[in-house]
Amino acid sequence: MTVALPASTPATFEIKSANLPLVALLLKSPDLGTLSRELALRFGDIPDFFDNDPLVIDLSQLPADADTVDFAALMALLRPYRVVPLAVRGGRPAQMAAAAEAGLVPAPDARVSTPAAPPPTSTRSKAPAPATEAPPAPAPGALVIDKPLRSGQQVYARGRDLVVLSMVNAGAEVIADGHIHVYAPLRGKAMAGARGNTDARIFALSLEPELLSIAGIYRTSENPLPEGVWGKPTQVRLVPGPEGDKLVMDLIKV
């Protein structure tokens, strides 16, 4: 016998599923001293890089013989960078137990990935999206800077591309989560794909940089640029290889 019960909706609350975008820290060593120095080197001069972003700590890349992480110290180390450690994934049972004692929630279903190269071009059209799916929100437009950047100045395009129409002088920094376009001499530091976008590129009408970086792979002025690109219109891209990712520079035909 089937019994149908009347449905009722609570007046004071509803339970719904939700998705929370997370920043992931892919931990490769339990050495917090080295991590502290490298975090300071990468983010110490970009105080607004994070904006109280929730963070999951991924332990899947730790060496098999690594010691248990001091999660309380790790969380204290991360908080000044304006991230909020909430969860942990990918660790061995002892590591996950230690993380739970520190207040981190196990999140085995959290997906952590790096942007992949675009798929090969196909002549076939894409299948239409299901009618029930809402259209994606449009990406924010590029941040455009039309004044020269002097030494000591810094511009960060969070979540978008950066377009600079004037000179980036030595000692200035331009940072973007997407591409960087400099339609003038680039003589300072340029960091594209700042949050790990390996497809990001740097374009400059005159490449004369102090530092170039894409997704954390960098090259300083201590290493001379390839012959023929200094002071020329150039694009910089990240190319994977058997010995690791490297920055490749190509002249732009104008």
Image (tube, grey):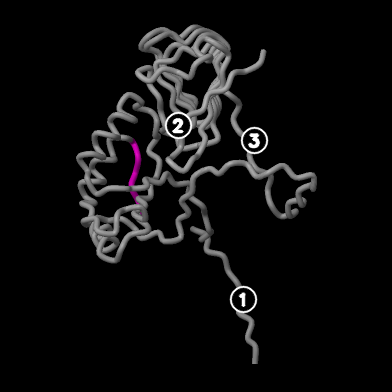
Report whether 104 appears left or right of 231: left
For the residue marked with disc 2, what is the amino acid?
Answer: Ala
* Label 3 neighbour load within 10 Å: few <14, some 14-19, many 20+: few
| Residue 70 visible in the current orientation | yes
Is 211 drawn above or below residue 129 in the view shown? above
Q: Which residues, given as a range, are shown in magenta?
A: 82-87
Q: Secondary structure at mark 3?
A: loop
For marks 1 and 3, the one nearer the N-term is 1
Residue drawn 42% across the image and 32% down it: 217
> Residue 28 versus residue 43: which sits nearer the camera?
28
According to the picture, the residue beneath numbered tag 1 turns out to be 6
Report whether 37 appears left or right of 218: left
Q: Position of residue 3 (x, y in %)?
A: 63, 86
For the residue marked with disc 1, what is the amino acid?
Answer: Pro
> Residue 98 versus residue 135: which sits nearer the camera?
98
For the residue marked with disc 3, what is the amino acid?
Answer: Pro
- Which is in the foreground here, disc 2 or disc 3? 2
| Residue 154 visible in the current orientation | no
